[in-house]
Amino acid sequence: MYDYTEEVGNKLNDLLEKNYDAEKGYRKAAENAKSDSLKRFFNRKAAERNSFGHEIKSELKTYGQEPDKGGSVTGALHRTWMDTKALFSSDNDESMLEAAITGERAALDDYEDALSDNEPRFPERTASILKNQWSQIQSDLNKIKRLEDIS
């Protein structure tokens, strides 16, 4: 039986909070984007991050841990910055793509930090879920970079 530690729960709750933030950020980006295709992309990313959050919540509950609710102050500040940037930017779509790139890079770092720590060691199933989420974020970061190049 795997010994599920409080540190594992804390790391998962931290990733859960970051996914809440990303979901809200992508919804905000979809509101601010001019292009319909970019709006759809950002809405898809928001739904994806919602799904990531549910997967992490499920893992937390499996081990009897209570999932945190809400997002972080940092995430709220980033969304406010996105609104301000959109208000004053002549090219909303490009600025939203830049914000998405910044957010995705930070997400990759957060996942890498959680997965590379010697402690906690995640249960195999949990580590697999997190690695799959990391891979999807990496793949979409490459897509966002390509979208930025053509906008």
Image (cartoon, helix red, strand yellow):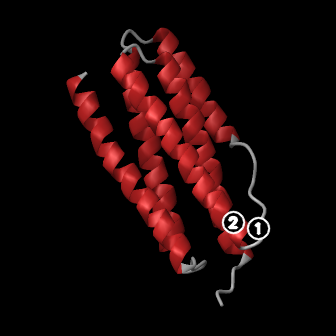
Label 2 environment density (alpha carbons within 10 Å; few <14, some 14–19, many ≥20) = many
Question: Does the image show residue 100?
Answer: yes
Q: In this view, does 35 lie above or below 43?
A: above
Q: Where is residue 68 in the image (x, y as percent from the top left)?
A: 75, 54
Amino acid at the residue labelled 1:
Gln
Q: Residue at x 65, y 62 (%)?
A: 58
Q: Where is residue 91 in the image (x, y as percent from the top left)?
A: 36, 13
Which residue is rendered at x = 62% and y = 38% of the image? 75
The quadrant of the picture occupied by the C terminus is top left
Contact (Cβ within 8 Å) of mark 1 with mark 2: yes
Mark number displayed over residue 60: 2
Do we see residue 99 in this rendering?
A: no
Q: How far apart are marks 1 and 2 (CA)?
A: 5 Å
The percent coordinates of residue 8 (x first, y second) are 65, 72
Seen in the picture, residue 94 relative to 135 is either above or below; the reply is above
* Residue 93, position as x, y percentages in the image: 37, 19
Residue farthest toward the left in the current orientation of the protein = 150
Residue at x 35%, y 52% (from the top left corner): 138
Q: Which residue lies furthest to the bottom in this view?
A: 1
Q: Which residue is pictured at 59% across the width and 34% down the height?
A: 24
Q: Kindly identify the amino acid type of the residue bearing the numbered disc 2.
A: Leu
Relative height, residue 34 to residue 24 (above, below): above
Query: N-terminal of the two: label 1 or label 2?
Result: 2
> In this view of the protein, which residue sits in the foreground, 87 or 139?
139
Q: Which mark is residue 46?
A: none
For disc 1, the marked residue is 65
Q: Mark 1: which secondary structure?
A: loop
Q: Quadrant of residue 141?
A: top left
